[in-house]
Amino acid sequence: MLKPSPPIGATLIVAGTTIGAGMLALPIISHGLGFGLMALLMLLTWGLMAIAALFTLEANLAIKPGCSLFVMATETLGGAGRLIAVSAMLFLFYALLAAYIAGGGAQLSQYISFIAPDSIPENQLGIVLFALIFGTMAAAGIRYVDICNRLLFLFMLLAFLVALVFLSPGTSFQKLQSLPNSPWQGFVILPVIFTSFGYHGSIPSLIAYVGPRKKLLRKIFLLGSFLPLLIYLIWLAIALGQLNDSTLASISENGSVSELVQALSHNKSSCLTTALHIFTDLALITSFLGVALGLFDFVHSATASSSRLKTAFLVYLPPLAIALLIPDAFVIALSYAALALAVLAILLPTMILSKLRQNRTLTRLPGGWLFWPTLAFGVVVSCLSLLFS
């Protein structure tokens, strides 16, 4: 059995949480922009989100290493900060968990259809089992998430490499040199790119796991988020180098993930289709584990509960009910995900840091001149999310 290794495990939890829906969303939204502009926007977003993670790290260590965002906001911003933290965290993470449970349940139902009783809809059984199995892993604690996530990430990476072997020979570098039809379209899709680099809700849990080792944690957040960036860029280059404009336009208009997978695997080996499905399944699970871990520790701290079972009910019952009763409701909520993430990842940490400086807990704001561009980026993403949701 694998022994938990905090530095390695934390790095892979960051990477696994980040790699999720963005893996398939990025090629879908890239029509008309071209690989060059998409890559530039992704690099910019990754850099500023990494800086924002370091801001959260700095604030967390200054207040109480490993404390939740609830404690951080309460200690520095009072009742207003606590309300903002709770509202943004619950809105974003319940929406994400509902999406992951609904999507994961649909995928799981395909594998268990042969044992499902006729009286129970297969999809509903898959949803319940997905929440029960993987929710239990997250509720058990970060050490168990570490072990499970490392195994899943390894198989996910292998599936990705298999897909690259089949897709790389058909990649046209000429298609990657196309210029954007309208550069202003980048503003419209910036919130989607932004949410593709979100892992910040699990930062307090990772600090508690690794310990208050600032230099090591900085490396963990930078490397853990850079790995998804690298995979995103390779995947985007392969996808855009494979598909023609008409196919990309159709996929972009419909927003269909299944259509994207079908287009990439058309007239190719069945091994490719299998690898793509394995990759997307595992990417969803690792993202679920990271989000569930962050929300679990947040709720556990906010309620001051001594029972992990009671916390589990508070964490999983609302998104499970949404996935079972109103499975399409999370789509509307997810359209505002960038706004909630901007609050959690950028706006709230920068407000906390400013307050700490006023209280002279910190003598200066970390990041120097990068503090204000990062704050401005969070404001821009929030406004774009409201405008185009």
Image (tube, grey):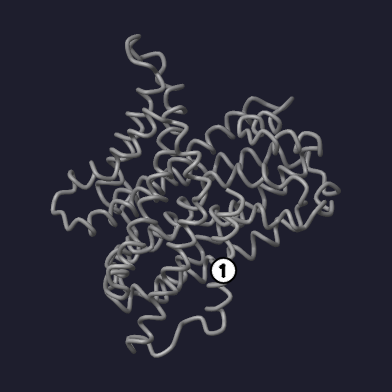
Residue 21 versus residue 325 in the image, above or below: below
Residue at 62%, 28% in the rendered image: 271
Place of residue 59 in the rendered image (x, y in percent of width and height, measured from the top left): 37, 75
Amino acid residing under circle 1: Leu
Residue sitting nearer the eye, 64 or 150: 64
Asked whether, in this view, residue 199 is left or right of residue 380, the answer is: left
Place of residue 334 in the rendered image (x, y in percent of width and height, measured from the top left): 49, 45
Q: Residue furthest top?
A: 118
Residue sitting nearer the eye, 133 or 59: 59
Residue at 54%, 44% in the rendered image: 21
Quickly name the residue at label 1.
48
Q: Secondary structure at mark 1?
A: helix
Asked whether, in this view, residue 41 is left or right of residue 92, the answer is: right
Residue 244 versus residue 41 in the image, above or below: above
Place of residue 241 in the rendered image (x, y in percent of width and height, measured from the top left): 77, 44
Residue 214 versus residue 221 in the image, above or below: below
Q: Which of the 4 image quadrants contains residue 118?
A: top left
Residue at 26%, 54% in the rendered image: 299
